[in-house]
Amino acid sequence: MTVLLAFDTAAPHCAAALLRGDVVVTRVEPMATGQAERLMPLLEEMLAEAGLVWADLDGIGVGTGPGNFTGIRIGVAAARGLALGLSIPAIGVTGFAAAGYGLPRPVTITLPAPRGQVWQQRLTDDGPENPGLVPGEAPVPDSLANVTAIARIAASLLGTPQPRPAPCYVRGADAAPPRDPPPVILP
């Protein structure tokens, strides 16, 4: 029986799902900030309530965005660290893949983005097309359904070669890199 812990911090929430075989237990805590402080205690609580410990896990699933820049980095860093420390695979799942889970292909997924825009990606039988940022409105995805989809998708990919989880950034950062070169440190 597969035991997988999945989580997502790319939106204003801390969402987690514990998959044991075909059973998924989820928890979502809405929060605009504070995911870094809440994520690990939330995961430990879920494991303890199920009578499990970290060593019982077969894998980690993580939402990779798009979404809040800092939130994405929190989730991806936690997944990579747990995978490394536990010697288990971590599998990244985009918000597009989670929102499109179980839908017939081709399908265009739109996710809410800031400033009256949406992130958009077309999913086909041949794979996903490049995502984009376009004007529009999209409903806020169901956090419980998304974290459940992340868990199920990640579990279905266990045992297959997967890249390390990486953030899904659809556009560049709001902050510009510094214009001054870094200081030179002399010996």
Image (cartoon, rainbow, N blue to C red):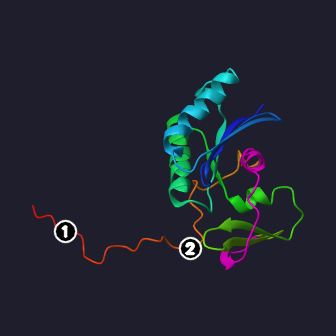
Report the span colored magenta: 128-155
The reply, left or right, for residue 175 in relation to residue 153 is: left
The answer to whether residue 163 is above or below residue 31 is below
* Disc 2 secondary structure class: loop
**CA distance separating discs 1 and 2:** 29 Å
How many marks do you count on the picture? Answer: 2
* Disc 1 secondary structure class: loop
Give the residue drawn at x 86%, y 71%.
106
Give the residue drawn at x 51%, y 73%.
172
Give the residue at mark 2: 171
x, y (%) of residue 152? 77, 46
Task: Based on the picture, tell me whether residue 134 belongs to the magenta stretch.
Answer: yes
Give the residue drawn at x 70%, y 24%.
50
The answer to whether residue 53 is above or below residue 111 is above
Q: Residue furthest right?
A: 104
The answer to whether residue 110 is above or below residue 5 is below
Give the residue at mark 1: 183
Crowd class of label 2 (few under 14; some 14 to 19; many from 20; radius 10 Å): few
Q: Amino acid at mark 1?
A: Pro
The reply, left or right, for residue 178 in relation to residue 126 is: left
Give the residue drawn at x 81%, y 56%.
101
Q: Is residue 145 visible?
A: yes
